[in-house]
Image (spheres, coloured by chain):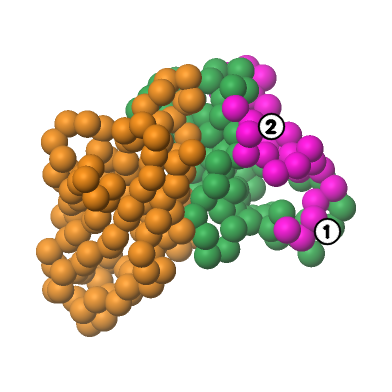
Chain colours: A orange, B green
Amino acid sequence: AQSVTQLGSHVSVSEGALVLLRCNYSSSVPPYLFWYVQYPNQGLQLLLKYTSAATLVKGINGFEAEFKKSETSFHLTKPSAHMSDAAEYFCAVSHRLKAAGNKLTFGGGTRVLVKP
Amino acid sequence: GAGVSQSPRYKVAKRGQDVALRCDPISGHVSLFWYQQALGQGPEFLTYFQNEAQLDKSGLPSDRFFAERPEGSVSTLKIQRTQKEDSAVYLCASSLGMAEQYFGPGTRLTVT
């Protein structure tokens, strides 16, 4: 079974400061990894994904994440927070086995507050 | 192009009523997923379709929940005899095979 743990349900950062959101996973096989963002009353938007190419993945809106197999982590970072980054962020994993489909297992989410 | 659409966006049901939630996936997307997102939590998988075949329904919480995709495009999630614990946002997503999933805006169901 797969599981995802996001450390910190709420993170507060100042505008212009580093954003760091932590994600650790457990999986019996190497997974695909994703970060999604959710704005109020909206669906989830994909920020970036890891599917076994480069371990440092760049996404939209200046976000990036690094896959570290030894630490079973996939932390999300952005060098300089913007007010528009205020949202909820979800880390997710899916199986590589085609027969399993690619259903996602999500973490509990981290809500980001950006202070002016 | 058009993304995933869901209707209604908001639904209020009295306990015991049946509800039907609709998902229109992106045209040509083979895979369709339903997720349930309780307040303050991450989405949880409910069921998965590949074309019209329901290949995984392991996440459906009870036999009151039923999903169908008869022609391999539009899908309906039906909840019979709704209970208060069914209150949540129901998200639909579609994808091409093993590729990334595109999510709709969700249907917020409130059971009173």
- Please rate how many residues cluster around mark 2, counting C-alpha atoms within 10 Å: few if below 14, some from 14 to 19, many from 20: many
Q: Of helix, strand and loop, which one carries label 1?
A: loop
Image quadrant in which the N terminus of chain B is located:
top left
3D distance between C-alphas at marks 1 and 2? 21 Å
Work out whether residue A9 or residue B89 is closer to the camera in this orientation and state it.
A9
Magenta residue span: B56-85
Where residue B19 sits, quadrant-wise, is top right
Q: Please, what is the three-letter code of the amino acid marked with disc 1?
A: Lys
Examine the structure image and report whether residue B69 is included in the region drawn in magenta. Answer: yes
Which SS does the magenta portion mostly show?
A: loop
Q: Which residue is mark 1?
A: B14
Q: Residue at x 27, y 66 (%)?
A: A84
Q: Quadrant of residue A114?
A: bottom left
Q: Nearer the viewer, residue A101 or A82?
A: A101
Name the residue carrying label 2.
B67
Residue B36 horizontal/vertical position (percent): 59, 48
In the image, what residue occupies the spot 32% across and 55% down? A23
Amino acid type of disc 2?
Ala
Q: Is residue B75 above or below residue B62?
A: above
Chain letter of mark 1 equals B
Of circles 1 and 2, the one toward us is 2
| Residue B21 position by quadrant | top right
